[in-house]
Image (cartoon, rainbow, N blue to C red):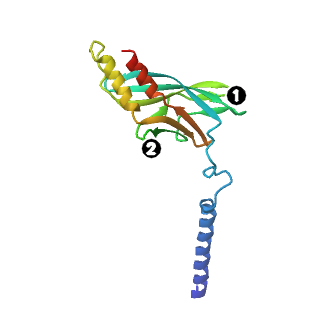
Amino acid sequence: MSKRNLFAIACSAVGLVLVIFFMTHAAAFKGSPSDTSNKSWNAEAIKASYIASQLKETDKTRSTLILSYDLENKTDLDYRLDAGPGVVILSRLEADGSLSQQEPVRLSYPVFLPAKQHARLAIEIVQPFAWPTADNPAYIDKLREFVKQRLANVHEFVLFDQTSRTEVKLPGVWQELQDTAQASY
């Protein structure tokens, strides 16, 4: 084989590799039509109202704070929320309004919300907590302090469904709860 033939084969091989590379990576260089990362978040589709809080002993070293909300679907489409990588729940901080993932927050269960209907949603925050014994005179105070510490800097929670680009604001009523608890003494 002559040098000229070897050079032609080598050039053809390099060209073939480049064509394959560009064909397989072309989507990375241009946005696909189904790419929703540039689409703005829809914060009007689902409205949430706070319902209740519950503190449960997960085990002797951890507790789960459960916050329940009523969701209202204001659209003509059914909506489904499943725990997974596409659903992110962040805390909006009281101090500056920034979003934080410091507290691990997750959905308690999947939610199906039919068009123009209401459904319940619960989120959970699991944290280390040495559960006090019921005969401890400071039992109630320790539970209240645990909840207060978990929510002290949180203005609200915000749920982002990356698949549908839906943003759901889960309002915080912690200050109202704290005021009510103090008034009940």
Tell me if 103 is positioned left or right of 171 in this view: left
Taking the image as drawn, is residue 2 in sight?
A: no
Q: Mark 1: which secondary structure?
A: loop
Image location (x, y in percent) of residue 5: 61, 84
Badge 1 density bin: few <14, some 14–19, many ≥20, Cα 10 Å: some
Badge 2 density bin: few <14, some 14–19, many ≥20, Cα 10 Å: few
The image quarter in which residue 6 lies: bottom right
Residue 181 vs residue 133, the one in the foreground: 181
Q: Residue at x 67, y 50 (%)?
A: 34
**Position of the N terminus by quadrant:** bottom right
Closer to the chain start, of discs 2 and 1, is: 2
Taking the image as drawn, is residue 43 in sight?
A: yes
Tell me if 11 is positioned left or right of 98 in this view: right
- The residue under label 1 is 116
Tell me if 169 is positioned left or right of 62 in this view: right
Cβ–Cβ below 8 Å for labels 2 and 1?
Answer: no
Image location (x, y in percent) of residue 145: 34, 25
Image location (x, y in percent) of residue 156: 49, 34
Q: Residue at x 46, y 38 (%)?
A: 91
Checking the image for residue 96, the label placed there is 2
Instruction: Inspect the image, locate mark 1, and give the three-letter code of the amino acid beneath it.
Output: Lys
Most distant residue in the top direction: 135
Image location (x, y in percent) of residue 181: 40, 19
Q: Mark 2: which secondary structure?
A: loop
Residue 180 vs residue 74, the one in the foreground: 180
Q: Residue at x 43, y 31 (%)?
A: 125
